[in-house]
Image (cartoon, helix red, strand yellow):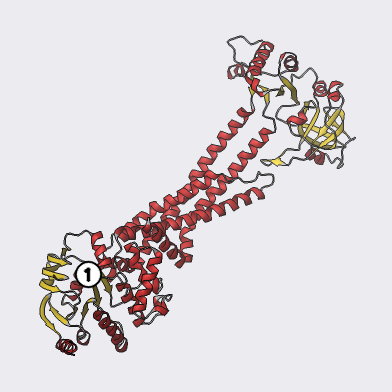
């Protein structure tokens, strides 16, 4: 313990004596650690923000979407959640606060909208007043779709800011009419811009009342509906889920042997897929970047070997005045560890800065988030690299013969 | 009881086919508070003698008793302990750590002895005072003159309070005036009771010592007491 403290003292003074060389030596570690931290911080920031996005759905909400089993798809059947299904759920399910159906004109795709000779494509969905809560929409001008809009099938529309810009509508578009699917719809509200996510604008959309949408689509098209349910009490989740399955199976006239042609998803299920993707990404990127730490370690070993040769005479002097093997061994080992830890610390700070910079310079990218474990791993790994690559030069120094070392010029 | 006793010490080096006898059956004993010089031309074996006496090297044959303990059976770490506690080395080229201050250089043997920092500083300061360098403690070797560097080296050798001060050509790199000062310091240390063993090729340096051992081809060819010292000692005793 005593010689450990002494070794630290001598290591620090030695590192300081060769300031620039020490810096160059640790550069490998600095680059390795900082890139690890930067990558991990950006990926973690991303995952944090995705989780936040999903929390917007509300932790007590579940969603229902159609999902055609593979065997059915091969037969050319495509499953749908129909308006009748929504009605059946509304009638028969219990413990549900809101039902928010979402009727896309063309699920996943975009549809054309027109205003004064301008045409633009946007995601158009029919929904109800509860959509505002579910999607966390704020209204900049006007209002959102109301209960009565839906009930009396008013021809009104709420649009996003990107769509307003593309259609060259005035700053406050409330009261203007835009054309969708051959009908003129009155703009009653403009949503507050949400910015972009993964480089995609979140403001290129239009919402109209669910019933209006149904009317526009007509009966020719069997639309597929995405339903979000807000539960009164999350504790009844399993019960409610089981009941929903029963209702939908009955609606779709599924035989007991047939698979469900729909999916009921809880928020956890939505996030877990993305989380596992992100953790795989973190591991892979971390693995690639840690190779550079090994390269940095070799750099340290190289300089330590040079340093041992350079200080052969000093080692001889120390041995002549009573240094034991372990004194010399520790001195050089600690010096290597101090070098790599120094690199680790600088790397952590630099990586943190880089992560912040990267996150800030990409518009709409979530802020970087450096988890404690990444700092601990980077720190531990650089100490490990120091020991691993310091042991050979240190052993070389400790095993020098005092007479030969003293004679060394 | 002698401080050092050498029995049939031999040291052979193998140079290819040839065997060089650096030391050839040396028998010698050195008492406490002796002031002794090993003298000889280069290749006479005096450096090898120095290394063996300083426990830096082990003899090929023979027995070296230091304080009645045989050195032959000790491990490397035990030898390091002896070098640390029993022996103070002084080299021709000073051999100070170039980046460390005078004080740090003097403190170094105490580090290996396991003395805490505060006590180390105290002992090192005392030792530097003994060699009249208390005002140069923060200077690094390159800021000191040759004589001052050798004084730092002497302070470093003295700091552990060793049984033997082992000096290898201590004035070899110094001018004549500085040599005189350093030798005066050795004389003084001897008078204070220090055992001093010196290796030199200069006769006037050897003249300071009370006993002179001349080596040639690894053998002791002369071993005599310096007359004038004996005279001087007798005089002081008579007075």
The quarter of the picture where the N terminus of chain A appears is bottom left
- Outermost residue to the front: B239
Residue B128 image position (x, y, % from top left): 36, 76
Q: In percent of the image, x 71 and y 27: which residue is there?
A: A107
Q: Is residue A146 visible?
A: yes
Q: Does residue B164 appear left or right of residue A31 in this picture? A: left
Q: Is residue A261 visible?
A: no
Q: x and y percent of residue A49 in the render?
A: 65, 39
Q: Residue at x 72, y 13 (%)?
A: A92
A326 or B208: nearer the viewer: B208
**Label 1: few (<14), some (14–19) or many (≥20) C-alpha neighbours in 10 Å:** many
Farthest residue, direction right: A175
Task: Kindly indicate the quadrant of the structure image that contains residue B150.
Answer: bottom left
* Rendered image quadrant of residue B219: bottom left
Quadrant showing the C terminus of chain A: bottom left
Q: Mark 1 highlights which residue? A: B54
Disc 1 secondary structure class? loop
Q: Is residue A328 left or right of residue A233?
A: left
Letter of the chain that mark 1 sits on in the rendering: B
Q: Is residue B47 above or below residue B210?
A: above
Q: Residue at x 16, y 62 (%)?
A: B72
Judged left or right of residue A119, residue A261 is left
Vertical placement of A148 versus A171: above or below? above
Q: Position of residue A37 (x, y in %)?
A: 54, 48
Task: Give left or right: position of A93 versus B175.
Answer: right
Q: Nearer the viewer, residue A57 or B133?
A: B133
Residue nearer the viewer, A381 or B236: B236
**Percent position of residue A280, x then y:** 53, 37
């Amino acid at each position: 313990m005593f010689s450990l403290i002494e070794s630290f003292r001598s290591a620090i003074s030695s590192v300081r004596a060769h300031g620039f060389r020490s810096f160059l030596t640790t550069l490998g570690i600095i680059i390795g650690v900082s890139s690890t931290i930067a990558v991990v911080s950006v990926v973690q920031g991303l995952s944090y923000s995705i989780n936040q996005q999903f929390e917007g759905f509300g932790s007590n909400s579940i969603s229902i979407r159609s999902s055609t089993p593979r065997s059915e798809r091969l037969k050319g059947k495509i499953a749908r959640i129909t308006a009748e299904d929504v009605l059946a759920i509304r009638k028969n399910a219990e413990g549900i606060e809101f039902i928010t159906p979402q009727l896309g004109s063309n699920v996943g795709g975009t549809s054309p909208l027109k205003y004064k000779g301008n045409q633009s494509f946007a995601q158009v969905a029919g929904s109800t007043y509860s959509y505002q809560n579910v999607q966390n929409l704020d209204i900049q001008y006007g209002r959102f779709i109301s209960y009565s809009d839906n009930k009396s099938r008013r021809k009104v529309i709420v649009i996003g800011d990107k769509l307003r810009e593309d259609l060259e509508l005035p700053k406050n578009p409330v009261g203007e009419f835009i054309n969708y699917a051959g009908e003129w719809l009155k703009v009653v509200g403009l949503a507050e811009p949400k910015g972009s996510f993964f480089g995609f604008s979140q403001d290129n959309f239009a919402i109209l009342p669910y019933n209006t949408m149904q009317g526009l689509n007509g009966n020719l098209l069997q639309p597929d509906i995405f339903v979000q349910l807000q539960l009164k009490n999350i504790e009844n989740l399993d019960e409610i889920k089981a009941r929903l399955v029963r209702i939908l199976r009955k609606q779709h006239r599924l035989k007991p042997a047939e698979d469900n042609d729909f999916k009921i998803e809880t928020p956890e299920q939505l996030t877990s897929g993305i989380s596992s993707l992100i953790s795989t990404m973190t591991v892979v990127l971390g693995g690639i970047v840690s190779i550079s730490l090994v390269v940095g370690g070799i750099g340290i070993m190289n300089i330590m070997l040079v340093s041992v040769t350079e200080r052969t005479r000093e080692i001889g002097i120390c041995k002549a005045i009573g240094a034991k093997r372990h004194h010399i061994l520790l001195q050089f080992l600690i010096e290597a560890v101090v070098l790599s830890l120094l690199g680790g610390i600088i790397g952590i700070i630099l990586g943190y800065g880089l992560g912040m910079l990267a996150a800030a310079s990409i518009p709409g990218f979530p802020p970087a988030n450096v988890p404690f474990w990444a700092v601990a791993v980077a720190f531990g790994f650089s100490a490990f690299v120091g020991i691993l690559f310091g042991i050979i030069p240190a052993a070389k120094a400790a095993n020098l013969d005092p007479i030969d070392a003293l004679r060394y010029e | 009881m002698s401080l050092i006793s050498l029995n049939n010490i031999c040291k052979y080096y193998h140079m290819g086919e040839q065997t060089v006898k650096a030391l050839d059956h040396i028998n010698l004993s050195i008492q406490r508070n002796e002031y002794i010089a090993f003298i000889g031309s280069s290749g006479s074996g005096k450096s090898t003698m120095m290394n063996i006496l300083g426990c830096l090297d082990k003899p090929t044959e023979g027995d070296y008793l230091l304080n009645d303990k045989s050195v032959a059976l000790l491990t490397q770490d035990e030898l390091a302990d002896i070098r640390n506690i029993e022996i103070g080395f002084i080299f021709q080229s000073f051999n100070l750590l170039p980046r460390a201050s005078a004080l740090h250089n003097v403190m170094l043997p105490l580090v290996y002895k396991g003395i805490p920092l505060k006590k180390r500083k105290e002992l090192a300061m005392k030792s530097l005072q003994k060699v009249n360098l208390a005002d140069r403690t923060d200077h690094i070797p390159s800021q000191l003159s040759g004589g001052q560097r050798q004084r730092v080296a002497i302070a470093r050798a003295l700091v552990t309070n060793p049984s033997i001060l082992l000096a290898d050509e201590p004035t070899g790199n110094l001018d004549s005036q500085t040599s005189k000062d350093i030798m005066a310091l050795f004389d003084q240390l001897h008078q204070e009771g220090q055992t001093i063993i010196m290796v030199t090729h200069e006769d006037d340096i050897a003249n300071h010592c009370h006993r002179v051992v001349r080596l040639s081809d690894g053998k002791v060819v002369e071993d005599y007491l310096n007359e004038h010292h004996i005279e001087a000692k007798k005089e002081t005793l008579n007075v």
